[in-house]
Amino acid sequence: MADATRARKIADRIKVIVAQTLEKRIKDPRLGFVTVTDVRVTGDLQHASIFYTVYGDEDQLVSTQAALNSAKGLIRSEVGKGLQIRLTPSLEFIADSVPAAAAELEELLAQAAARDAEVAALAKDAAPAGEADPYRKPHEDDESRD
């Protein structure tokens, strides 16, 4: 079993090799504008999960996934040549959902800011509903009984 530092170095090297291979060697027209965002390697260096994003809509994502799966053998052989380790890890391509989640969070934060602005506009000219000092004061009669 490899240590975490070696696994991280191999993951970084796989990321570079895959990005270069996609840029220079893969000529599939289904392949969109792909960015390799992260690579995670198991502790025994037998499996690599490659996370990627695609610029475009859902159709571009689906066609890019098909192109990556069809070119998986070529990409794995390039990774094997570039790593020069005893066993080449198997590759799995996973569409990264972080950008979509970040966009959704940005939209929710914008909605919350708009609602806060509405509440602030309504509260600008508002007056308290009751008395200025809502707390009870002891009556003068109560003090004289003690």
Image (cartoon, rainbow, N blue to C red):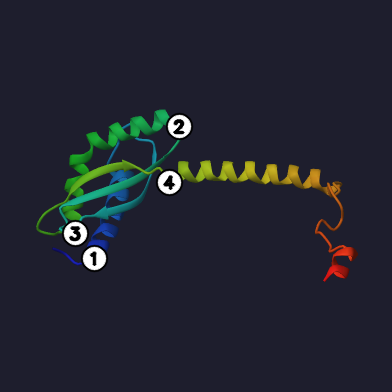
Task: Please state which of residues 134 and 122 is positioned toward the viewer in this rendering.
Answer: 134
Tag in front: 4 or 2: 4
Query: In the picture, residue 117 is in which quadrant?
Result: top right
Q: Position of residue 11 (x, y in %)?
A: 26, 57
37 with respect to 139 (left or right)? left
Q: What residue is shown with label 3?
A: 43
The tag on residue 98 is 4
Query: In the picture, residue 72 is in which quadrant?
Result: top left
Q: Position of residue 17 (x, y in %)?
A: 27, 53
Q: Position of residue 53 (x, y in %)?
A: 39, 43
Task: Please state which of residues 73 and 58 is positioned toward the viewer in this rendering.
Answer: 58
Give the distance between the C-alpha atoms of the residues marked 3 and 4, in whole angstroms. 24 Å
For the N terminus, give its image quadrant. bottom left
Q: Amino acid at mark 2?
A: Asp
96 with respect to 68 (left or right)? right
Circles 1 and 3 in contact, beta carbons < 8 Å: yes
Q: What residue is shown with label 1?
A: 4
Task: Please state which of residues 68 and 90 is positioned toward the viewer in this rendering.
Answer: 90
Whether residue 12 is visible here, answered yes or no, is: yes
